Amino acid sequence: MQSAVVEQPMSEAFCGCFERVRIVFSNMDFISELFLPGNTSIASTLVLYSFVIAAGIYIGKMKIAGVSLGVTFVLFVGILMGHFGYVVDNAILKFVREFGLILFIFSIGLQVGPGFFSSFKKGGMRLNVLAVLVVALNVVIVLGIYYFGNIHDISALVGVMSGAVTNTPGLAAAQQTVSQMTQSAEQANMMASGYAAAYPLGVIGIILSMFIIKWVFRIKTDDEIRKIEEEQEDSSLKPYILDLKVSNALIDGRTLVQFHDIVQTNFVVSRIMGSDGKVTIPKSSTEIHTGDILHIVCSAQDAERFKAVIGPEVEMDWESTPTPVFSRRILVTKGEYNGVALGSLRLHNGYRLNCTRVNRAGVDLLASPNLRLQMGDRITVVGNLEDIDRLASRLGNSMKRLNQPNLITIFVGIILGIILGSIDLGFGMKLGLAGGPLVVAILLSRFGYKAKLITYTSSSSSLMLRELGICLFLASVGIAAGKDFAASVFNETGMWWVIWGFVITLVPLVVVGCIARGHDRINLLTIMGLISGSCTDPPALAYANNSTANDQPAVAYSTVYPLTMFLRVVAAQALILCLL
């Protein structure tokens, strides 16, 4: 009797569990709706995009010979899924593609904008001219293939060119232009196929060109690294700190204003120790006397001039010197000070403080009255703690505030970019949804403070916005192109795409690299950065940095990147507008 009582509930429980399993399996239609090809529901579309992006990013992290293709593998996974019959509703696909494109292009513009105009100064002009020559040679080769070669489809050729120089924004701009002109997806898909066919050898060709330059001129990397390090020590323009004892009787009794007229260069005297051992914060009317010790912040190249005019360098430990004077860094986080000139803060008169330098994006800048502050700047000030705290309260000094995204600027910029991209510039030319936001983002990042728009975005937020946009765009392009990809690429035409793509990659880089080394005597590390930047190719830059253990390639890359990125977008659009 007891056994029967126990078995009955167990039997009922088993039957209930079996019934629930049966019900689940009887409703397995949701699996086919979500995961099988051919469905275009919102849920299946989200699953498809999520899988393509996640798988593409995961595979893209794998390295071959120390080089990875990054998020570009999202395109190849999308092509694979499209080949196996996975589709997205055309209206949804176009929206996601264009919205991803705008996010990506706009964030690129904000990133390169601050350096876009300054990249033309001094030595950067020569590097930018060489980068422009690379872009021009790419276009010339494409035109030669189009008129005299065996490929006469300009859409495919522009895709091949974008893939050959690993420039996704150029592909995006050209696709958007084609869509506006033809209202047909066929040309855009052909362009994506050409891009995918040329891209892998494009990465290889960029790195190979570095080896060719090195071999042709018999260059030893270690010698180039040593030369770069020597040049950086001799001609660095970073703020340089000197402690000098006044021994020149000719400047005894001179004020700092008069002393500035003598040396004729920018500098800051942050504190002075008198002969009596008392430390003071000087102002423009403070007099210099023989025996004083001056704590000076100047450019490294001016250090010898100050030693000659003032006196010998001495060793001072200001931290251990008993004094009410302290040095602190203050973070600019209030929007009203974005774009405000440092001199207008009246630091000495209002706060009895001296500003010695400004750190912006990890780079120390010499403080000067005309230097305009930006959100996220860290200014180093010297003075009493109470005065430093008052200034910190005024400027914000809140890291939490910087973590808040400035979405108003982003969406106002997108609106202005779309408006600008829709304006007919003549001859049927428009900047489109790629060029318009790019131009507006560059202008806002440089001049946005004049309109009280804060363009500061933390590095993580900027990277998130850019990666999300490019992943959405590449996934859309891959899925749309996947259906006809195999038929378009795995044939004689596709073979020529790969061959011509490799020519488009290698020839301009080798020619310009030889000019840079043979004629201009540019250091190999700088040439490596120039080659990577002229193709806007992060994998090649990563290889250059890892192989040299020096940041000079990155410096050259950042110098030519802004102009090159702009020209790549414009060149791809111009070829479509003129020849389609």
Image (tube, rainbow, N blue to C red):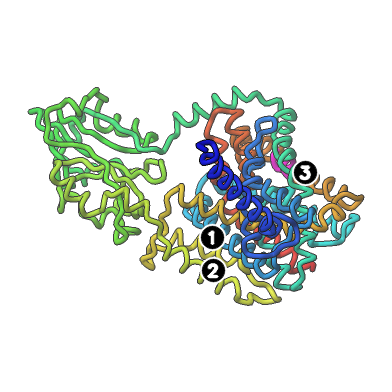
For mark 3, does the 10 Å Cα neighbourhood hold few (<14), some (14 to 19), or many (20 or more) residues?
some
Q: Residues within 10 Å of mark 2 (few under 14, many from 20)?
A: many
The magenta region covers 506-513
Q: Which residue has dot 1 on it?
A: 106
Question: Is residue 476 left or right of 446 when viewed as pictured?
Answer: right
Q: Main secondary structure of the magenta part?
A: helix
Residue topped by disc 2: 417
Q: Is residue 38 visible?
A: yes
Residue 512 shown in magenta: yes
- Checking the image for residue 507, the label placed there is 3
Q: Amino acid at mark 2?
A: Gly
Instruction: Write the residue at 64% across / 58% down.
Output: 473
Q: Secondary structure at mark 2?
A: helix
Q: From the viewer's side, name the closer residue of 309 and 93.
A: 93
Disc 1 + disc 2, Cβ < 8 Å: yes
Q: Amino acid at mark 1?
A: Phe
Q: Disc 2 vs disc 3: which is toward the camera?
A: 2
- Picture quarter containing residue 193? bottom right
